[in-house]
Amino acid sequence: MLFVFECPTCGARIEDDASVGGRRAHCPQCQGMVAVPESRVSCGTTLGGFRLERRLGKGGMGEVFLATQLSVDRQVAVKVLPPSFAADREAVARFLHEGRLAARLDHATIVTVYEAGEDGGNYYLAMAYVEGESLDQRLKRDGALPEREALAIVRAIAEALCYAWDEFQLLRRATATPAGASWSPTSTRCWQARRRQRQRPRAPVARV
């Protein structure tokens, strides 16, 4: 897998072999030697058939990128499992298993999962990209929602949770958060499960 990153000195694009980490690479523009970042995933990296274009978010459970699915030239969201989890075989197995289960869900208010896989030691989950703002962003901007709208949102989320549970009992340790509910331009609400941290770090439940 080819790892693409920017030179910290001149900003030039550097392509490097992602299978070899913790070393230095040559910058073709400024001719300097730069340290290869510990994280082997950045904008420009291709995982499977998905080219990462822009970072959408980052947290302790990994990074989410806007990406292009090269085979059909469409925008998707790709979540990448962080190195701390990728080193845990149990966490990786759970991440891939739950991602594949989530891909079998078919519900109007659940984000569609396309693929769960691995490329160059990086584990990823590709899903539909929902363009719009999260419920968390909406609340911070506008404050409390009107009662009728708030109840409609709660009902939509509850229906999605019930469906996912009935299908695969997929959400055993999930918790619904405002940051996980999003509006698309067509006003379709999509909810994504967030796993609550317990005792020790565990792999995130597949987004649904």
Image (tube, helix red, strand yellow):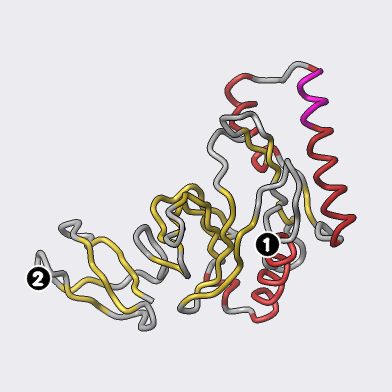
Instruction: Name which residue lies at 68% across and 64% down.
Output: 99
The mark total stands at 2
Instruction: Classify 186 as above or below 66.
Output: above
Percent position (x, y) of residue 152? 80, 26
**Left or right of 16, for residue 132:** right
**Left or right of 153, for residue 62:** left
Q: Is residue 10 magenta?
A: no
Image quarter for residue 190?
top right
Give the Cα separation between the discs numbered 2 and 1.
41 Å
Label 2 element class: loop
Image quarter for residue 85?
bottom right
**Left or right of 133, for residue 74:** left
Label 1 element class: loop
Which residue is the extreme one toward the front? 72
Percent position (x, y) of residue 131? 53, 38
**Left or right of 208, for residue 32:** left
The amino acid beneath tag 2 is: Gln
Instruction: Name which residue lies at 86% across and 58% down.
Output: 167
Instruction: Classify 162 as above or below 15.
Output: above
Q: Considering only order in the chain, which callout, 1 or 2, is on the residue closer to the N terminus?
A: 2
Percent position (x, y) of residue 63? 51, 57
Neighbourhood count class around disc 1 (C-alpha, 10 Å): few under 14, some 14–19, many 20 upward: many
Percent position (x, y) of residue 135? 65, 32
Q: Which residue is mark 2?
A: 31
Q: Which residue is mark 1?
A: 204
The amino acid beneath tag 1 is: Pro
Instruction: Name which residue lies at 41% across and 58% down.
Output: 52
**Dominant SS type (magenta):** helix
Find the magenta span and give its range: 148-153
C-beta proximity under 8 Å, tags 2 and 1: no
